[in-house]
Amino acid sequence: MDARRLARARWATRAQFLHLGVIAGLFGAHVPSLGARYAFDEQRLALTLLAATAGSVAMLLLAGRIIGRVGARATSVSAGWLFVLSLVLLLRLPSPWLVFVVMFLYGAGQSLYDIAINAEGSMLELLGQRAVMSGFHAMFSVGAMLGAGVASLFFRYGMPPVTQLLVVGLPVAGLMTVAARGMLEVHPPADADSAHFAWPRGLLLTIGLLILAGMMAEGVMYNWSVLYVQQELGALPQRAALAYVAFSGATAAMRFAGDWVRARVAERTVLVAGAVLSMTAMAATLLAHDVTVAMVGFAFVGVGLATVVPILYNAATRVPGVSRAAGIASASSIGYVGFMIGPPLVGAIAHASNLSWALCTLIAACLALMLGAGRIPLATGRTASLASSGAAS
């Protein structure tokens, strides 16, 4: 494949990660809006997030087969419209019970879209023979920062939440469709059996459990950071939304540097250092109980967690015997359980005590990452050789 075609596909995939981040950031900033619209407390909010995760996990069983049959490009278009339209409808429902159905569809679409663009990114890294996955995930973080930042701006000027979801969501869905035209038309053919969902075991199970810890930690930040600053620290909605901006912005900055770091530092070392930094930053934030400290602390949490998912997703594609999409889907099936466990666990702890204690789940997740980092397979090829030379120098 010629260099120009690969460059075009890389830019298209960056755009798709950016779009996913915008919608995720918009949703994260509106978790309090969801609670206010339907009079949900922390426990019921946790159950709505659980519904989204159930949709994500259900789709993981089919994602490898769907992407193997129609390709990542076509999959990203249909999945993107599904989860964007679900979000647009979220605050317009006549009954609170319909929230759980819509959240299930939102999670299913987001999961399928996520796996499709990660499979595309992994293939581009393979074909281009250079590390690009961390940069792709950086675009997700930039998008999340933009989505939450736009929500903060709209709150400041009094735009109703239901209107915010509409005026941001529909243009993003249109841009997803346009950007998909630059993605690879098809992936190199995979064995029919390898494209099916592979039940996690052995090395895939190990990677999946670490993704679980990483996604649980990220999920805590994406779903609860804004509510923590607004409810526990007493900030106004427009300022509380900036907690998400601080986390996502720092995550993006580190992910842009992540491919350079991966080429020079062993991935296991990066994971351990990041876990320690995130644990320390979250502990300091909770002890200080101050809005400004929270913003800075969440930024350092983002730096620590930034490289976890790119490293582990790519590790899942190196497992022999399964396609790249199926490998990501398999390991992610456990990872998404982190989102499934996280919301009700955080909600239950917050209901029993307060949200400050509930956020300690992030510290526990980072501890698991730190202890398990030594189990991931070492990178091979050009990235590994660059890391070795960098370490030697």
Image (cartoon, rainbow, N blue to C red):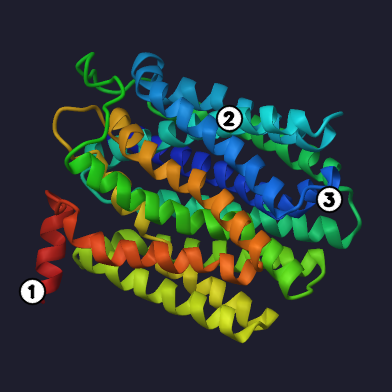
Along the polypeptide, which appears first: circle 2 or circle 1?
A: 2
- Can you see residue 131? yes
Along the polypeptide, which appears first: circle 3 or circle 2?
A: 3
Vertical side of 118 occupied by 65: above or below: above
Q: Nearer the viewer, mark 1 or mark 3?
A: 3
Q: Nearer the viewer, mark 2 or mark 1?
A: 2
Residue type at tag 1: Ala
Residue 36 disc label:
3
Seen as rendered, the residue at the extreme front is: 352
- Local crowd at mark 2 within 10 Å, few (<14), some, or many (≥20)? many
Pick the residue in front: 354 or 247. Answer: 354
Which residue lies under the disc numbered 2? Answer: 80
Which residue lies under the disc numbered 1? Answer: 392
Alpha carbons under labels 3 and 2: distance apart:
26 Å
Q: Secondary structure at mark 1?
A: helix
Vertical side of 77 occupied by 175: above or below: below
Q: Are the residues at dot 3 and dot 2 in contact (C-beta closer than 8 Å)?
A: no
Pick the residue in front: 311 or 376. Answer: 376
Q: Is residue 265 left or right of residue 52?
A: left
Residue type at tag 3: Ala
| Image quadrant where residue 269 sits | bottom left
Seen as rendered, the residue at the extreme right is: 158
Seen as rendered, the residue at the extreme bottom is: 288
- Local crowd at mark 1 within 10 Å, few (<14), some, or many (≥20)? few
